[in-house]
Amino acid sequence: MIGDIGGHRAELLAALVGLGVDPDELLLPADLTVVQIGDLVHRGPDSLGVLELVADLMERNGSRWVQLAGNHEAQYLGRHTLFEWHERLAPVASRMLRDWWADGRMVMAAAITSPGGDHLATHAGLTQGFWEQVLDGPGTAPYAARALNGLVATKSAPVLFHGGVVLTGKVDETAGPIWAAAGEELAVSWLDADTELPFHQVHGHSSVRDWTAGRWRAPMRVQKRTVLDADARHTTVTLGRHRIVGVDPVLGREGGVRWAPYVIPGGSIVR
């Protein structure tokens, strides 16, 4: 799992090299599948370069590169979101995103099975309210991923882009998988629910820990359930038998921070 890249081509390439990818051939090792959690673009110096690198990785590795959509891609995918970042991509870059979305190379969710349990990967995480009210409570990560991806081509697609506190300033425990805030909406929604979190989750977009400022972005009841990996910039919130893992490294405009992909040993994509 590779977190938000935000226009930093060099950071993405360095992370891949650390996973055993040859920087020239761009071939993933035989036992490696990569899920990139979305937000490839904006903030950093080379959004187009990131997209071109990912296009090469897709072409050379096929289904072993899984690309998720983030909120920074979403503004180029139609009229489903009120969000518009002040930096605009070049037309060639925005066309790439629309093409990936149209032909299924970029998706909303992925499910990973592993000896440690099933994981659902989305950009911002699946809140309990969205899981229950929109998806009708799928009990496994593969069913949840299929339900989310199945909404894309339907009249209900706009619900995927339903915002919460990040967009409106008001906490919404039904915020969608593009916009849910990690501490205030995602983790809290499952803590507040009578229903147990049915599978592990991995997300980017935001973090229960502000790595830059060194402070929390979550209430105390979430903090008490969280383990921090500062070297990798991962957060793990344990809720009963399952975990919500945040992998956004918060690269900002400059990058250059210490971070690492999140590895699920023995994991495989469920299609």
Image (tube, helix red, strand yellow):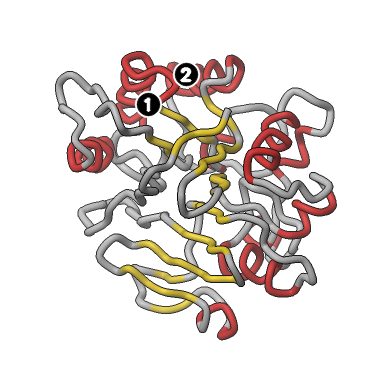
Q: Is residue 213 above or below residue 122?
A: below
SS for tag 1?
helix
> What amino acid does circle 1 point to?
Leu
Residue at the location (19% across, 35% down)? 20
Q: Amino acid at mark 2?
A: Met
**Relative horizontal placement of residue 99, taking residue 31 as reference (left or right):** right
| Position of residue 212 measured from the top left corner of the image (x, y, whole percent) | 34, 68
Residue pictured at 57% horizontal, 69% vertical? 183
From the image, tell me which residue sits under label 2. Answer: 96
Near-viewer residue (72 or 260):
260
Examine the rendered structure and indicate whether residue 157 appears above or below residue 223. Answer: above
Q: Which residue is mark 1?
A: 51
How far across and how far down the image is residue 223, in percent? Answer: 51, 80
Residue 44: % across, % down? 32, 43
Q: Is residue 133 left or right of residue 232?
A: right
- Badge 1 crowding class, 10 Å Cα cut-off, few under 14, some 14 to 19, many 20 or more, is many
Label 2 crowd (10 A; few <14 / some 14-19 / many >=20): some
User: Dividing the picture into quarters, in which one does residue 231 lie?
Assistant: bottom left
Residue 40: x and y in percent read: 41, 37
Q: Residue at x 37, y 72 (%)?
A: 228
Q: Mark 1 or mark 2: which comes first in sequence? A: 1
Query: What whole-number distance in Å separates the C-alpha atoms at marks 1 and 2?
Result: 8 Å
Tell me the element at label 2. helix
Task: From this view, report whether residue 34 is shown above or below residue 212.
Answer: above
Q: Which mark is residue 192?
A: none
Q: How many marks?
A: 2
Left or right? Give the position of 11 relative to 66: left
